[in-house]
Image (cartoon, grey):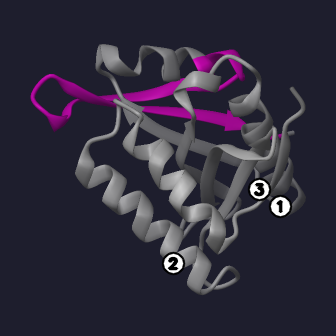
């Protein structure tokens, strides 16, 4: 199954939102925030501060990633959101999205990528995915999101 990664277009938003809503890790308020970032990107792709890509397989949206430069830093970037259709996970779609984002970040002078995620068991597969892509756990803040839900910060230095 070949994966094509391209810039998000307005017509892609319903499919991306469906993927987000069907991702059990994301709470409804988080899905709303992701939708707001998509809207900001679609309204002003160059000035929004966000870059958003989609993965397409068999003519359908299979996943997406949203990333951007971290304000007030030199060369540090954040991956804000990433999601892959649950039925298609494990087929290289997330890897293709992250690799394309990393290449873009590096080409634009990025030197460090940060990914923040939850420390709950629901996010174990995400944590393993980042570690398999050579992201290191750099910080853990206990009870950050709520009691029992730590913030994990993964980082990757680009050479």
- Between the residue at mark 3 and the residue at mark 1, the CA separation in whole angstroms equals 4 Å
Say whether disc 1 or disc 2 marks the residue closer to the N-terminus: 2
Residue 117 seen in the figure: yes
Q: Is residue 142 left or right of residue 147?
A: right
Residue at which label 3 appears: 110
What secondary structure is marked by label 1?
Answer: loop
Q: Quadrant of the C terminus?
A: top right
Residue 123 at x, y = what percent?
A: 39, 22
Tell me the SS state at disc 3.
Answer: loop
Q: What stretch is highlighted in magenta?
A: 129-158
Membership of 133 in magenta stretch: yes
Image position of 30 with respect to 11: above or below: above
Residue ID for mark 2: 40
Q: Which of marks 1 and 2 is in front?
A: 2
Label 1 belongs to which residue?
Answer: 109
Q: Does the magenta stretch include residue 106?
A: no
């Amino acid at each position: 199954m070949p994966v094509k990664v391209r810039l998000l277009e307005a017509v892609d938003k319903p499919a991306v939102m469906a993927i987000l809503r069907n991702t059990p890790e994301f709470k409804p308020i988080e899905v709303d925030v992701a939708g707001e970032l998509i809207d900001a990107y679609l309204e002003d792709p160059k000035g929004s501060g966000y870059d958003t890509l989609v993965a397409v397989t068999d003519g359908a949206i299979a996943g997406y990633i949203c990333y951007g430069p971290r304000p007030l830093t030199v060369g540090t970037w954040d991956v804000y959101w990433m999601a892959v259709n649950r039925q298609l996970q494990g087929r290289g779609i997330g890897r293709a999205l992250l690799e394309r984002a990393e290449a873009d970040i590096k080409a634009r002078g990025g030197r460090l990528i940060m990914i923040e995620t939850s420390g709950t068991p629901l996010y174990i597969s995400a944590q393993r995915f980042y570690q398999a892509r050579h992201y290191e756990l750099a910080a853990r803040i206990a009870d950050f999101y709520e009691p029992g839900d730590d913030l994990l910060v993964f980082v990757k230095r680009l050479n």
